[in-house]
Image (tube, rainbow, N blue to C red):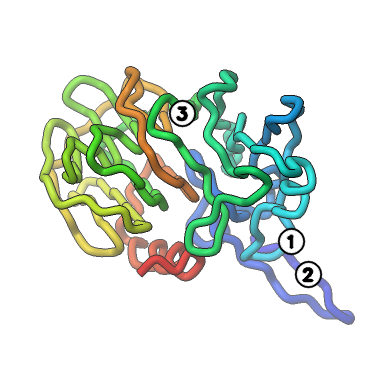
Amino acid sequence: MPKKVFLFGSYSPITYFTDIFGMPSVAYSIRKLSPLSTNCIRVRRSSDNAELNIGFVSNTADALIDTSALLSFVGSNDGFVTTWYDQSTNARNSVNASSSQQPKIVSSGALININSKPSILFDGSDDALVTSYTVTNVGDLSVQLVEKLNNITAASVSVTVSEAANKQLYMNYISGPTSFNNYYANQFNITTANTNQLISSFYMGASGGGFYRNGTLAFAPTRVTNAGASNLTIGKYSGGGFNANGNFQELIVWDADKGSSKTTIESNINTYYNVF
């Protein structure tokens, strides 16, 4: 239920993303998606490798990561993300314990922004975050990704959702040079890549589905079912390599077909990030 905020004896409901669309299987974002969310990320500063959890700035539906607390902690140094907290109720946090492979959110004391909002920068070399979540059925699945790629000439995978044989799902697979692959279960189409901020979506269910980019259908593959075999991986191919050089702001996955809510989901995301 929406959170109630009392104002002079009455209340105004705060409606969060999860209040509207239900609780996802995993949800990572630089905004507050659920009234239950407390932490956004855990950050390591370069000066002494100390770490701190960073929450959200307020209890509102458009609450952003607490940038004041983040910048105060990091100072004039670099800030790296050790954990991107799962805002679903499943606690499937996305982590990397290796300091050399952690993506960056603050550079020399300055936030790394895309379109005026903070982003997490993966360097295209070895940065990645790995979750404990494994897709159970690629035939009933929905994925939302807000990302801006910076290098579209080198082969990379932005998100590995599933790597099971014949049931793979990759989000924004760059085969290089300058080629996007919408890749699902050995089915793919190739389009021209760009370095724009994008909302990339995937929906699949009993009635079919497909890949969308900024609300427009890019490719409609044939549905397959059964389980995946690899943990959800952000920033690279789960088997190693193909690291993405890009700025990530949101990744939401449901073990369900949310295609019937496609328009309202993408409108909610686009209203916040102002992508298209």
Q: Give the residue number, with chain letter if any, for mark 1.
A: 59
Q: CA distance from mark 1 to mark 2?
A: 9 Å
Query: Callout 1: 10 Å neighbours few (<14), some, many (20+)?
Result: some
Query: Callout 2: 10 Å neighbours few (<14), some, many (20+)?
Result: some
Identified at 73% across, 30% down, the residue is 47
User: Of label 2 and label 3, which has the lower sequence position?
Assistant: 2
Q: Amino acid at mark 2?
A: Val
The quadrant of the picture occupied by the N terminus is: bottom right
User: Of label 1 and label 3, which has the lower sequence position?
Assistant: 1
Identified at 50% across, 39% down, the residue is 26
Q: From the image, state whether disc 1 or disc 2 is nearer to you.
A: 1
Q: Give the residue number, with chain letter if any, for mark 2.
A: 5
Q: Amino acid at mark 1?
A: Asn
11 left or right, relative to 183: right
126 shown above or below 6 = above
Of the pair 173 and 143, the residue shown nearer to us = 173
- Identify the mark at residue 127; answer none if there is no mark: 3
Name the spot of residue 167 as percent of width and height, x first: 21, 28
Query: Callout 3: 10 Å neighbours few (<14), some, many (20+)?
Result: many
Q: From the image, state whether disc 1 or disc 3 is nearer to you.
A: 3
Q: Amino acid at mark 3?
A: Asp
Q: CA distance from mark 1 to mark 3?
A: 31 Å
